[in-house]
Image (cartoon, rainbow, N blue to C red):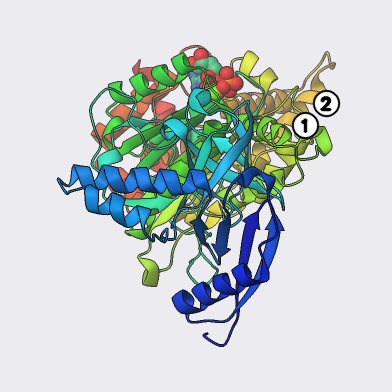
Amino acid sequence: MSDRKISARIYSPERPSADQLERFERFIKQHYKRDCSLEWVRDEDIGEGFKLEVGTDVYDWSVEGRLSQLQEAITSAAAAGGDVIPLLKSTVGSWTPRAVSEQTGTVVTVGDGVATVKGLSGAEYGEILLFDGGVRGMVQNITQKSLGCMLFDDGDSVKAGGKVKRTGSSAGVPVGEGFIGRVTDALGVPIDGKGEITASGYRPVESPAPGIAARQPVNRPLKTGILAIDAMFPIGRGQRELIIGDRQTGKTAIAIDAILNQKNTGVICIYVAIGQKASSVRQIVKTLEENGAMEYTTVVSAPASDPAPLQYIAPYAGCAMAEYFMRKGQDVLIVYDDLSKHAVAYRSLSLVLGRSPGREAYPGDVFYLHSRLLERSARLSAAYGGGSITALPIVETLAGNVSSYIPTNIISITDGQIFLDTSLFRAGQRPAVNVGLSVSRVGGDAMTPCLKSVSGTLRLELAQYREMKVFTQFANYLDDEMQKSLRFGEILMNILKQEQYRPYKEWEQAFIIAAASSRGLDWLPDEDFEDILRGICRSFADEHPDVIERINGGAKLSEEDRATITEFAKAAQNVK
Ligand code: ATP
Ligand code: MG
């Protein structure tokens, strides 16, 4: 490397004389053992003296720089109990300032959680900068003249003209087992009042997604306990399944149910709340606590009251926490609630940073914003520990419009979507899964053969029911056959209704679908459907534990077992 020239710049208000330039060159040659290409840049701000930049090192020979270095030297000498007189003497004599490892820049403008900084030419994208008062910021824009930097902390102490230092490290969060059961902000700082968290490590918030060679196919189920999802849109470990729907359609409810269902499965859960009301997040934490789910869950919260930079960073921070467990070979479920608000936070940030707005005023890289986040979900191959991150991003639509910008983006990045329908929700069909528009592209392999064998025709039967319902809507006469078919469809819709926080076990799901599809449940009334159904399941468990054992074994449901289930379901109408 020594044959390569090192580039150096000298900043001063006046052009240095040839003699001075030669002295600088000698100095650089001596220190760096390399030839240099020295360039002079006029800088009126320096006042007296000059500033020398060699590679990433800066020698501040301006009056201000020399004084601040002297001050530092005296303070540290005094703190160490040393004598400051010799230091002062040597300073007055000949004193060469040392290269400052952290460069120092100046704040030019500040506002709306964003600061423009001048003079940190070596700073990198994503690097953390330190402002006055310990305020941290992250480099987002790099131009020839300045840096755009978003501020994570309350930026009151940051003023135009203030100093900024490089830290040389990119933004990261502490990670580790200590985070399980805790609620943190977007930077991993606990906000639940339960004291400090001991971290096991530190991970950058932005990190590259695992490559193709490091992955293996998704083929292990991640059960949500929700019949409508597990039976028709099964989710596998390592999959990314979007939950999409208008506001108040039960999106969060599905994600929370999925978390509750991970109890005793060894799956670690991370719930990232972005741009929500702090009271909603509090309610969610309470629900998780009451159901014993906080024992394996971390909540990362960037509520609506947090500045946009924190809302922007929160899902990446959550993902970094998840990666820690995945790299250790564990399975993680992460919920991003929700990415529409994340995109909005990023849009406001980008506009303040002066980036040009594109479609719906989002910046051009909003697709990359979400793809680089969701690509980090994976199921690693055995050689990489076999861990996984399953992601459930949530997106809110307006009036069911899935073709607007953010929804289409995220639909194309994920492996399927659970579409929630306002009209179904209002009609009491909860969870309001729209069977026609929902899809799971990779989860099929993750389904057990048993559940697959009973639920194979469910979607088709529901589609037929929907069609027939439209068709017969205005008919004033329906023959027996048609009435029966319609009734069958209604029963199927009814079995998909499920209260919150009441997950079904796998065998219950198989039992219910097998019983309903063989017309064993046609007698059920429309009221209290779910409670009666759960009652039947309980008594079936008492009487036929052998069938349940075979279902839990995962093998295809045999004809005899299917017949047993149908008989049992039919007979249950006389039991009540
Ligand atoms: P937002 O758009 O406000 O985030 P959301 O789509 O996340 O709303 P939720 O908050 O999950 O919707 O649910 C809305 C309401 O519906 C809640 O009061 C919730 O308790 C209720 N709810 C959701 N799912 C069910 C269900 N399966 N059974 C009964 N009630 C439900
Ligand atoms: Mg919600």
- Please tell me which residue lies in front, 439 or 127: 127
Q: Point out residue 299 in the picture as x, y percentages from the top left corner.
A: 39, 32
Rounded to the nearest angstrom, the CA distance separating label 1 from label 2 is 6 Å
SS of the residue at dot 1? Answer: helix
Q: Point out residue 145 in the picture as x, y percentages from the top left corner.
A: 71, 49
Residue furthest bottom as drawn: 3
SS of the residue at dot 2? Answer: helix
Residue 206 relative to residue 177: left or right? right
Q: Are marks 1 and 2 in contact (CB under 8 Å)?
A: yes
Which residue matches tag 1? 467
Q: Residues within 10 Å of mark 2 (few under 14, many from 20)?
A: few
Q: Identify the residue at horizontal 32%, vertical 30% (top origin).
A: 190
The residue carrying mark 1 has its beta carbon less than 8 Å from ligand 1:
no
The kind of residue on which mark 2 rests is Phe
Which residue matches tag 2? 471
- Please tell me which residue lies in front, 48 or 112: 48
Q: Identify the residue at horizontal 47%, vertical 69% (top origin).
A: 214
